[in-house]
């Protein structure tokens, strides 16, 4: 179970720069946030620390000032955010305003992570994290653009699936129009996407991989 944030950690996160997520604190405080996945240390001098997507979500979840001693876990965190690849049981607030806020915050955090970790500070192509979490990254781009994932017992939305290729995922959709829309969204998010047909089932799908240049 995730440990509750301390009062000092909550204050540090709340005080982060609203635009860049840049953090200020002691080395010990910043290192503790890095270990929890809420911050990362920029690889280039002056090696400042910035909020990760999880850190941005933790900041949005703060609903009040920290308690003076042992605080409770912020009531609206709901655990670690997970992009919906389609076909899994829907979370309680999957179609509600709370989920929309979570997705929007996660996508903004991802764009910030791109800016801080891509060598040229580019936000128009995926970063290293996305290349090692292909299905989650593609699903986040789709959900952030308003596409709906398929429910566990239906075919009414997109499904993102791993492929034998180490740098590509397959995206399925209920019809040709939805499939084309998914491809356009991924292309706009910095992915290379093309439509193909499965030889055995004749089912159409989009093969997508993160663009490198």
Image: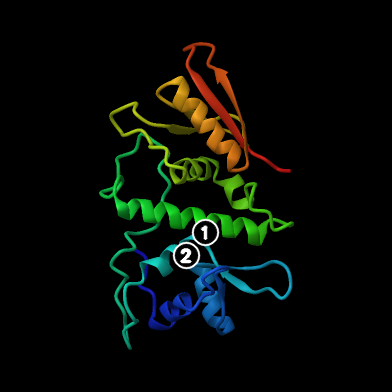
Taking the image as shown, residue 17 lies to the left or right of residue 65, namely right
The image quarter in which residue 152 lies:
top left
Residue located beneath label 2 in the image: 56
Could you tell me which secondary element the residue under label 1 belongs to? helix
Taking the image as shown, residue 181 lies to the left or right of residue 210, namely left
Residue located beneath label 1 in the image: 109
For the residue pair 108 and 4, the one nearer the viewer reads as 108
Most extreme residue toward the bottom, as rendered? 68
The image quarter in which residue 164 lies:
top right
In the image, which disc is placed on residue 200?
A: none
Q: Residue at x 47, y 34 (%)?
A: 160
Residue 44, above or below 181: below
Residue 198, above or below 144: above
**Residue 55 screen position, x and y as percent:** 47, 66
Could you tell me which secondary element the residue under label 2 belongs to? helix
Q: Residue at x 46, y 46 (%)?
A: 144
**Residue 213 screen position, x and y as percent:** 73, 43
For the residue pair 14 and 35, the one nearer the viewer reads as 14
Residue 153, above or below 17: above
> Closer to the N terminus: mark 2 or mark 1?
2
Q: Are marks 2 and 1 in contact (CB under 8 Å)?
A: yes
Q: Residue at x 48, y 26 (%)?
A: 179
**Residue 145 screen position, x and y as percent:** 47, 43
Can residue 162 be spotted in the picture?
A: no
**How far separated are the C-alphas under marks 2 and 1?**
6 Å
How many numbered marks does the figure carry?
2
**Image quarter in which the N terminus is found:** bottom left
């Amino acid at each position: 179970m995730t440990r509750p944030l301390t009062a000092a950690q909550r204050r540090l996160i709340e005080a982060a720069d609203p635009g860049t997520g840049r953090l200020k604190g002691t080395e010990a405080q910043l290192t503790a946030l890095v270990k929890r996945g809420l911050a990362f240390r920029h690889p280039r001098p002056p090696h400042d620390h910035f909020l990760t997507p999880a850190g941005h979500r933790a900041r949005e979840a703060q609903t009040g000032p920290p308690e003076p001693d042992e605080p409770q876990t912020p009531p609206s965190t709901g655990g670690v955010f997970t992009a919906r690849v389609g076909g899994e049981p829907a979370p309680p607030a999957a179609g509600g305003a709370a989920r929309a806020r979570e997705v929007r915050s996660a996508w903004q955090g991802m764009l910030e992570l791109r800016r801080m970790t891509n060598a040229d500070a580019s936000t128009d192509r995926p970063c290293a994290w996305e290349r090692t979490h292909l299905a989650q990254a593609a699903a986040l781009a789709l959900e952030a653009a308003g596409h709906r994932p398929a429910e566990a017992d239906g075919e009414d939305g997109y499904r993102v699936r791993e492929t034998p290729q180490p740098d590509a995922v397959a995206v399925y959709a209920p019809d040709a129009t939805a499939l084309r829309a998914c491809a356009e969204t991924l292309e706009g998010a910095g992915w290379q996407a093309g439509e193909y047909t499965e030889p055995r089932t004749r089912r159409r799908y989009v093969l997508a991989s993160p663009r490198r240049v």
